[in-house]
Amino acid sequence: MSEPAHAHLAPRPIPEPTGHRVRVVTMRLEDRAGVMQRVTNCIQRRGFRLETCAVGPTPEPGIAGLTLRIDPGYQPPDQVVKQLAKLIDVVSVEDITDSPRVEWTTAIVTLLRRGAEAVVDPAVAGLDGQVLHRDRDRVVVAVAGPPAEVATQLESLRSLPGADWMCSGPLAFAPGSPPRSATMDLPPPAAVPPAAPRGR
């Protein structure tokens, strides 16, 4: 496995198919119990369809990063950001669909080797990936890169013995955006007035 073709990946516009309605949305949220349920409930309640979701920690303590691919159906695309911004846990939210961006996804692939080494091993050697495990019966490979490239590699393995895989939702980043981007500025929490003194 040689150096990946995408080793020096640059942000670029990523065209979507004609008529494709899916929006790519990045969020920063307070990382606490129930936050993902509130996000998915909001998406479901508004009649949007969640295509993929990727979530993980950020350098900021207590803040999680989230990349969503959401189909708003026939509703105005800006409704996706407007509705998600209403959630109490949201620090920032941005629709980066039309921005030059980097997208990255990972797939874990399992192939059966026993009796098929002559076919499976050359296919694995030709992948832009990393072997995680190999024994007489099977090989497990991680493939990572831009979603379209990963999808092409997975399709090339479909006919191999025991081909099975699981693919993560893509992470996305638009380097031209402000560091803690916000397509809309979220208002600060309202001040809570001090409690009135209790009478004796």
Image: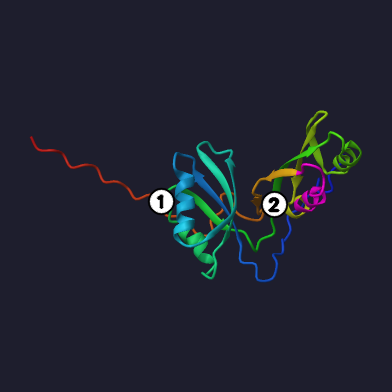
Give coordinates of residue 48: x percent, y percent.
Answer: 51, 61
Residue depicted at 61% across the width and 62% down the height: 22
Magenta residues?
151-163
* Total labels drawn: 2
Q: Which residue is mark 2?
A: 103
Q: Quadrant of residue 127?
A: top right
Mark nearer the viewer, 1 or 2: 2
Of the two numbered discs 1 and 2 on the same chain, state the one appearing first in sequence. Answer: 2
Q: Residue furthest left?
A: 200
Q: Quadrant of residue 186?
A: bottom left
Q: Is residue 73 above or below residue 116?
A: below
Residue depicted at 70% across the width and 52% down the height: 102
Q: Secondary structure at mark 1?
A: loop
Is 152 one of the magenta-colored residues? Answer: yes
Give coordinates of residue 119: x percent, y percent.
Answer: 89, 42
Mark 2 closeness class: few <14, some 14–19, many ≥20 residues within 10 Å:
many
Q: Which residue is mark 1?
A: 188
Mark 1 closeness class: few <14, some 14–19, many ≥20 residues within 10 Å:
few
Q: CA distance from mark 1 to mark 2?
A: 31 Å
In the rendered image, is residue 91 in sight? yes
Give coordinates of residue 104: x percent, y percent.
Answer: 70, 48
Q: Is residue 78 above or below residue 146?
A: below
Q: Amino acid at mark 1?
A: Pro
Give coordinates of residue 37: x percent, y percent.
Answer: 46, 47
Is 72 one of the magenta-colored residues? Answer: no
Q: Amino acid at mark 2?
A: Glu
Left or right: where 60 falls relative to 33: right
Mark 1 and mark 2 in contact? Answer it, CB < 8 Å. no
